Amino acid sequence: MVQTMTSLLEVENLRVSYSARTGEVCPALSGVDFDLGYGEILGVLGESGSGKSTLAAALLRLLPAGGKIQQGSILFEGRNLLRASPQELRKIRGGRIGLISQEPSCSLHPTLPAGQQVSDVLAAHENLDRRALRQKTGHLLASVFPGDSERISRSYPHELSGGQRQRVLIAQAIACAPSLVVADEPTASLDPTTQQEILQLFRTLRQKLGLAMILITHNPALLAGLADRILVLYAGRIAEIGPSAQVLYSPQHPYTAALLRCLPSHLAEPPSTRKARLHVIQGEAPDLSWHGNGCQFEPRCTERMEVCKRDEPPAAAVSELHEVSCFKFAG
Amino acid sequence: MQPLLKVENLVKHYGAGRSARSKDKLAALDGVSLSVLPKTTTALVGESGSGKSTLALCIACLEHPTSGSISFEGIDLASLDENQLRLLRPQIQLVFQDPASSLNPRWTALEIVSEPFFVQRRYSKPDRAVRALRLLDRVAISRKMAARSACELSGGQKQRLAIARALALEPKLIILDEALSALDCSVQAQISNLLLELQASLGLTYLFITHDFGMAAHLADQIAVMDRGRVVESGSAENVLYSPNHEATRALLAATPRFSEPPAELVHA
């Protein structure tokens, strides 16, 4: 489905590291490769420390101080973002790639009305006169707030609910008709009803605008029914990448399988299994300053082999489009 | 069996703005009744703004209700003066959503779990350290970790530490206010196992506040659903989960993300 057309985004061997104050260098992403087709939704699944937010920041070249892209390439619409000048980057961010961040209350200016914050994005990227600007802002807000977009436009962030603020951020992200939106835990702070509304909005926008999305989350259940493919990150490496249904319903990497087993399946199960112990992944989360050889998941893996301690597992295809980095499948 | 906690017709109004007149008052709790049996888990489920946390604060004597009554082991909390409350408070402990902001980042794990002993002036100094270490053992925080400051611990370790602190004064009731929501799935599983273990060995009663129906379904004996300051449905977990009566319950259940079987549309053409 994806490989047949040219990709919108190609990330190759991306390596990002952070240097601590002590001078120690911690790798956050160690050789990440993936591509994204036009209009495709890629879910990035990872736990804290897996490097998922680093990936989002690296794609937009917005790494915090101390973070450095050491190697690799990010080809977006045929251009290598790692060689783009600051001026070009400014045009791409918000223009071609929209970003929706985790905490909507921290991403909006507290003393400007929502409508103005959306029109500021438009004004920064497009040459519009005042009337056109106002008109376009009105359209944008109406597309994410069916109903009372007029009132929202005049409201300040503190007058809006979490879900409404998130919608304002979405309006900002799609303002200049980007081809890609990167959403980092866009629904983490919302309650489930609002969460579903926002996910529904993503579906609608993808259909209407043909947006490609990278949806970063730690919650596998959010990706079911939304993402086309899922990329599972563990300790800065891709454990598994493949079509959603395959990754969620027949996970191949021992980490993905263990992670999905942790979820309580209560609602579907007969009542007798409630209050049973949940599966856990033994051992501690990976230490990022670890520089050893071998598979990062090896210490916690129930299916470890001799080779896992020595070498890093290569990515191996288990079926078309489905790749797993584990020696179980290598050779 | 006599309920450990009985909340009757509880009302809590917050004033809206500086010049609040009576009609501007916001009813965060609008006549809530709830009873919790000892050694059980009651989940309080609802959307944000439905009044779950306000109820928790009232039960923990951190907010004064406008009207209504809360009784704990048959004692009406409103009838107690500050000294009597001081004796009662250790019985009811809280664990919050975000362990990073509920623990002092510069204190060591050991200092954090021993603090309740200092506050309540319990035990001798050497005794306190021994008890604190035993608590850390219970939640699987090693001796090595005990000397680390809270900011050096991972999210799951911090939440285990918050639970150890809540256990320090041997409470009967622990209010878990979204205590699992901020954690990764694999850590959620660890903590929920720990909570079940502690409940079985210490005979704890939990009031588990959450917007995640999934976890509520897993942990609770009783479920109460809140909507706009009222408990709109309550009963055994089975009844609420498998034959919900109220619209709000059905809406929450429908919004709970889950993937029990692969939906056909996922397998794209």
Image: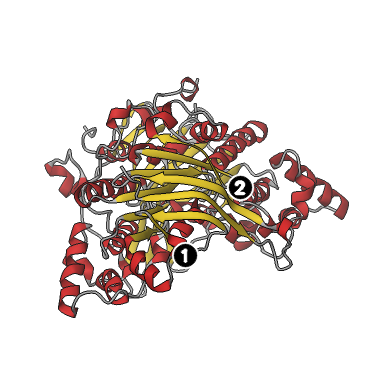
> What numbered label is drawn on residue A22?
none
| Residue behind mark 2 | A163
For residue A138, above or below residue A87: above
Three-letter code for the amino acid on which mark 2 is drawn: Gly
Q: Is B38 left or right of A226, judged from the image as shown?
A: left
Q: Are marks 1 and 2 on the same chain?
A: no
| Residue behind mark 1 | B62
**Which quadrant does the C terminus of chain A fall into?**
top left
Dot 1: element? loop
The residue sitting at the bottom extreme is B125
Of residues A102 and B42, which is closer to you in this image?
B42
Callout 1: 10 Å neighbours few (<14), some, many (20+)? Answer: few
Indicate the position of residue A76 as horizontal and vertical percent values: 55, 46
The residue sitting at the left extreme is A306
Residue drawn 26% across and 65% down?
B168
Residue drawn 20% across and 75% down?
B123
Three-letter code for the amino acid on which mark 1 is drawn: Leu
User: What chain letter is assigned to the residue under label 1?
Assistant: B
Q: Quadrant of residue B75?
A: bottom left
Dot 2: element? helix
Residue drawn 29% across and 36% down?
A257
User: What chain letter is assigned to the residue under label 2?
Assistant: A
Give me the C-alpha separation between circle 1 and circle 2. Answer: 28 Å
Residue B228 appears in the rendering: yes
Of residues B68 and A153, which is closer to you in this image?
B68
Indicate the position of residue B153 as horizontal and vertical percent values: 30, 64
